[in-house]
Each structure stands twice: as C-alpha cells, then as structure tokens.
C-alpha cells in the first residue's frame, strides 16, 4: 500500500480495517434502541456515518445529527479479544 510508505501506522490501521475478523472492523448494522437519539459522535462504536432514507450521511455532515429509528449505522468496531 502506498500509504504505508508515507505513514506506516496509517498503513497498519488501513490493513487492519480491510482484514475481517480481528482488531478493527468496518461494520454496517441496524440502529438498536440504545442508539436512537444519541449523537452520531457518541457510543462504543466509532460511527462513520448513517444510512437514512437510502442516502449515506457521513460523520460531520449536517444531516447526520442523531441516530433515528430505521437508520443503518456504518461504524468501526474493535473486535480484538472477542
């Protein structure tokens, strides 16, 4: 990976995200009751965005705001040791 030559730590994290089943993992899941009403920036998973009405709203987009019923969450989850 080209990014590894410029930043080995960044390259390591990207590789970790691309390898399913260990360390950090990208997931898409339905919002559960505990998610509803919480800011996109809060919680145990690191939310990268929500899919609402078929449209991806990325972290930091004005339309992301808080998690709503029916949202799908795109997040980074640490599964190391699970």
Image (cartoon, rainbow, N blue to C red):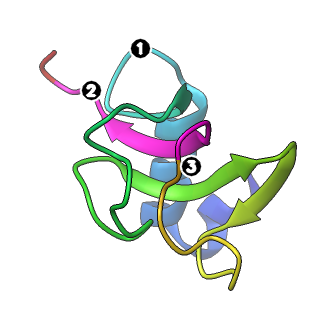
Left or right, 71 with respect to 51, comes to left
In three-dimensional space, the C-alpha distance between marks 1 and 3, rounded to whole angstroms, equals: 14 Å
> Going by the picture, which residue comes out furthest to the right?
54
SS category of the residue bearing label 2: loop
Picture layout, residue 55 above or below residue 70? below
Q: Horizontal and vertical percent for residue 46? A: 38, 55
Range covered by the magenta-colored residues: 69-80
- Figure quadrant of the C terminus: top left
Q: How far apart are the two marked residues, 1 and 2, measured between alpha carbons?
A: 7 Å
57 or 32, which lies in front? 32
Residue 21 placed where, x, y %?
Answer: 41, 14
Are the two marked residues, 1 and 2, in contact with CB atoms closer than 8 angstroms?
Answer: yes
Up/down of 5 relative to 45, above or below: below
- Disc 3 secondary structure class: helix
Report whether 66 appears left or right of 46: right
Q: Which mark is residue 21?
A: 1
């Amino acid at each position: 990976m080209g990014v590894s030559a410029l930043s080995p730590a960044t390259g390591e994290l990207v590789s970790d995200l691309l390898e399913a089943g260990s360390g950090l993992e990208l997931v898409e899941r339905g919002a559960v009751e505990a998610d509803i009403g919480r800011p996109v920036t809060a919680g145990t998973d690191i939310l990268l965005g929500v899919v609402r009405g078929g449209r991806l709203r990325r972290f930091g987009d004005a339309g992301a705001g808080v998690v709503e019923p029916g949202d799908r969450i795109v997040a980074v989850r640490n599964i190391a040791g699970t």
